[in-house]
Image (cartoon, helix red, strand yellow):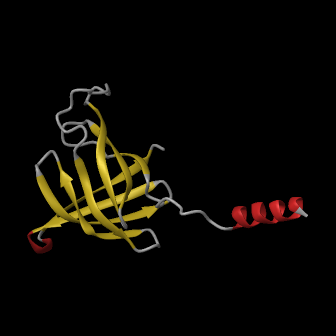
């Protein structure tokens, strides 16, 4: 009888989804910046929303830059997922211009489109980031 209960409990545990990580959680490679280098951003849950931190940098020659001045700094803050791959309500910081933009993101497969605007939508920029892991 104990075996049956254990097997049933295991079956229910496998059938019941665990508290799943957000689909955008992971490491992302930004598009190259004006100088040709790019960043790695680690996205993870921060309360009910998601946030991203700069966890790596590659210079224009394609070499890792362990002394990049913005390593460890937040780049995405308080993005609220809607459950369908769209995120809004947060901000994205552009280290190349030291500007923070009101942001929206869209996840499709292994591409995260990150867009941000300032001045009520008058100035906007965006990038497609590729999932690394």
Residue 98 lies, with reference to residue 64, above or below; the image says below
Instruction: Report which quarter residue 40 is drawn in.
Output: top left
The reply, left or right, for residue 95 in relation to residue 107 is left
Residue 121 x %, y %: 15, 72
The reply, left or right, for residue 101 in relation to residue 49 is left
Quadrant, the N terminus: bottom right
What residue lies at 24% left-to-right and 49% top-to-bottom? 74
Residue 101 x %, y %: 17, 62
Residue 70 lies, with reference to residue 14, above or below; the image says above
The reply, left or right, for residue 38 in relation to residue 21 is left
Give the camera-side residue of 40 and 34: 40
Instruction: Report which quarter residue 44 is drawn in.
Output: bottom left
What residue lies at 62% left-to-right and 65% top-to-bottom? 17
Pick out the residue farthest to the front: 2
Residue 119 x %, y %: 8, 70
The reply, left or right, for residue 110 in relation to residue 32 is right
What residue lies at 11% left-to-right and 55% top-to-bottom? 99
Pick out the residue farthest to the right: 1
How many numbered circles does the render carry? 0
Give the camera-side residue of 106 and 43: 43
């Amino acid at each position: 009888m104990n075996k049956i209960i254990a097997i049933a409990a295991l079956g229910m545990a496998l059938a019941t989804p665990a508290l799943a990580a957000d689909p955008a959680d992971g490491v992302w490679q930004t598009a190259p910046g004006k100088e040709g280098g790019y960043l790695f951003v680690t996205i993870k849950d921060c309360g009910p929303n998601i946030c991203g931190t700069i966890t790596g940098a590659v210079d224009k020659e394609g070499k890792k830059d362990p002394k990049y001045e913005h390593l460890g700094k937040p780049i995405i803050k308080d993005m609220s997922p809607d459950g369908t791959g769209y995120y809004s309500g947060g901000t994205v910081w552009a280290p190349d211009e030291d500007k923070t933009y009101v942001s929206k993101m869209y996840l499709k497969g292994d591409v995260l489109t990150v867009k941000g605007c300032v001045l009520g939508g008058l100035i906007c920029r965006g990038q497609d980031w590729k999932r690394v892991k």
